[in-house]
Image: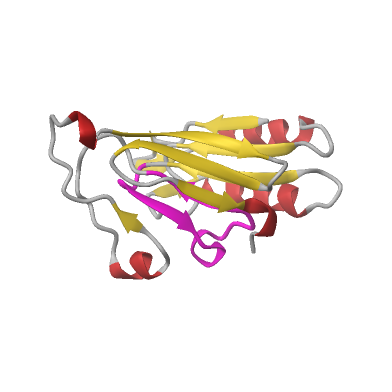
Amino acid sequence: RIIMLSNALKVSGALGVDAEPVAWFESILASTPIGANIIGMSHIGPQCADWTVGHDNIVTAINAWHDNADTGKVVAWVAGHQHYDWVVPSTNSGCSFPVVVCTCSYPSSITPSSDQQTAGAIPVVNRPRYDARQDSWSVFVYRPDLGTIDMVRFGAGNDTTVDYAHWS
């Protein structure tokens, strides 16, 4: 099951989700068949300080669902917004599953802060505009047989494999 959450909306002047999408998200989790796996997607990922409204409710709900042995597992949460690639460690995301941030197609050279770089963020730098080779988009290949997700990159950046089966 793939769940896409729109959280790049301004709510009371801040980015996030209000009570209605949180309730929808919780109902989707509740109706997910036992044993099913979930891949979550949103513009702003759970690790991002820009997501301020509704963040804790979403992260709490999905961590509780993921950590319940009677449900299924969250394979990963895929997001953008940051303009660089980053497989976010649990210590940075607050999530008990992988958060995969992929750079956006817009060629910019935003460099992660030093604390994010030590956590494995990979800047995709020096991307001149109007150069087709500097475009960036990814195809995600879910491999339940291997317990991995392969992110196949087209354009700027590199391929990445996330081993969700052994995530901690």
Residue 39 in which image quadrant: top right
Q: In which quarter of the image is the N terminus?
A: top right
Picture residue at 80% right of the left edge, 52% below the top:
68
Give the side of residue 109 with respect to residue 105, left or right.
left
Picture residue at 72% right of the left edge, 39% below the top:
37
Q: Position of residue 165 (x, y in %)?
A: 69, 53
Task: Examine the rendered structure and indicate whether residue 55 appears above or below residue 133.
Answer: below
Q: Position of residue 15 (x, y in %)?
A: 39, 42
Using the image as rendered, state which of residue 153 and residue 75 is in the foreground: 153
Picture residue at 35% right of the left edge, 70% below the top:
115
Q: Quadrant of the C terminus?
A: bottom right
Residue 156 in which image quadrant: top left
Q: Give the range drawn in magenta.
A: 81-102
Magenta stretch contains residue 149:
no
Using the image as rendered, state which of residue 161 and residue 54 is in the foreground: 161
Q: Position of residue 62 (x, y in %)?
A: 66, 47
